[in-house]
Image (cartoon, rainbow, N blue to C red):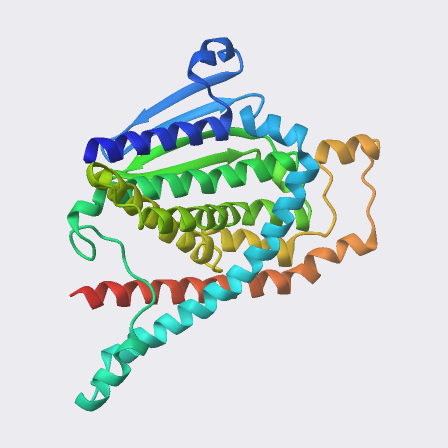
Amino acid sequence: MLPLSFLLGWAALWASARLLLGLSLPAASRRLASTSIEIELDWWRATVRVHSADGGLAGRLAARHRSALRKWFAVGAAAGLLAAACSVALLVGELRTLLRGLLPVPAGAAAAGAAERGPRLQLALPGVTLPLSHAAPLWLALATSLAVHEAGHALAATAEGVQVSAAGFSLVLMLPAAFVQLDSSDLAALGRHSMLRVATAGAWHNAALGLACWPAAQLLARLWWGPLRPLLAQLHLLLSYTLSLSAALALLNMAPVHFLDGQQALEALLLRPLKPQELPEQAEAQHGGSDSSVDGDSMAPASNSSKARAVRWILHAGTGLYAAVLMLHVLRMQ
């Protein structure tokens, strides 16, 4: 069964690579002028990074369907902000549940309240919290969920005119990771709504992936045909883990925590200007290089300082909450 799982996983990774940068194996030799592949090997990490001058398939899709994509990701921005609020509520509830579980409970009340006090989250550790035989489907589900997540960021960025300079996959201590590298100057020029669409696009695509996996998993659960039963069981397991991991990425990644997408969304919501900013070279060309100043502009940094402090404290609190829940889950395994 493992070879079948790995074949399915590599097929998903190859399809995701095509989505991110439009790499087609038969056509790769014709794109060497605009595409380069970089491989980095270390004792703890292996990375394949693809650089594309034209943005690949994501850039071509954005050029043809920019308006539709921006509407799609505008819905995703609203869903992402809702997910951020829900993630905080989930983490607070999880913290209360875990702390309550550390207290001694009378014997009579233990059975009555066991279902209510059960944690809603679980650490996915094959051989510890999950059967060791689930390691391969879980690995492939994580790789697929991360690739779809980053593809969402790439599509949203190109729809906003941001250049995708590179994308790729990594193995970090044998764990899969996917990434896209966006042009920093293009990102800096985005306004509030555009940056929100880019920041929430990954979680939005994970939500869409989870919704697509749910009916497929329900269907496979009812199809147990004789010789195909092992194949269907593996597919059902893969879809089930993809569903749960996509839901976790769609929800928890939007929490206001340092280094997560929730940080980017929070900063875009509170610190970004409403309208897109001019790039320095554009402003210099428009004003003829003059060093003109406006009194209202000089007051902008002071007015934003209080918002910046609020954002920092929110991120510190969210990170502390996230770390506390994670630590209590680790202690609960002992």
Total marks drawn? 0
Q: What residue appears at the point 46 percent right and 70 percent down from the top-left corner?
A: 89
Answer whether residue 116 is visible to the viewer in this image.
Answer: yes
The x and y percentages for residue 313 are 51, 66
Q: Quadrant of the C terminus?
A: bottom left
Query: In which quadrant of the rendered view does residue 95 lie?
Result: bottom left
Q: Is residue 54 above or below residue 19?
A: above
The x and y percentages for residue 59 are 60, 28
Identify which residue, 133 or 250, lies in the foreground: 133
Identify which residue, 90 or 330, lies in the foreground: 90
- Farthest residue, direction top: 30
Q: Quadrant of the N terminus?
A: top left
Taking the image as shown, residue 334 lies to the left or right of residue 69, namely left
Identify which residue, 144 or 194, lies in the foreground: 144
Q: What residue appears at the point 40 percent right and 67 percent down from the top-left corner?
A: 321
Q: Is residue 275 above or below residue 256?
A: above
Q: What residue appears at the point 63 percent right and 59 percent down from the top-left corner?
A: 270
Q: Is residue 178 above or below residue 327?
A: above
Identify which residue, 135 or 295, lies in the foreground: 135
The x and y percentages for residue 156 are 59, 40
- Farthest residue, direction front: 226
Taking the image as shown, residue 97 lies to the left or right of residue 208, namely left
The x and y percentages for residue 259 are 45, 51
Q: What residue appears at the point 40 percent right and 73 percent down from the top-left corner?
A: 93
Answer whether residue 266 is visible to the viewer in this image.
Answer: no
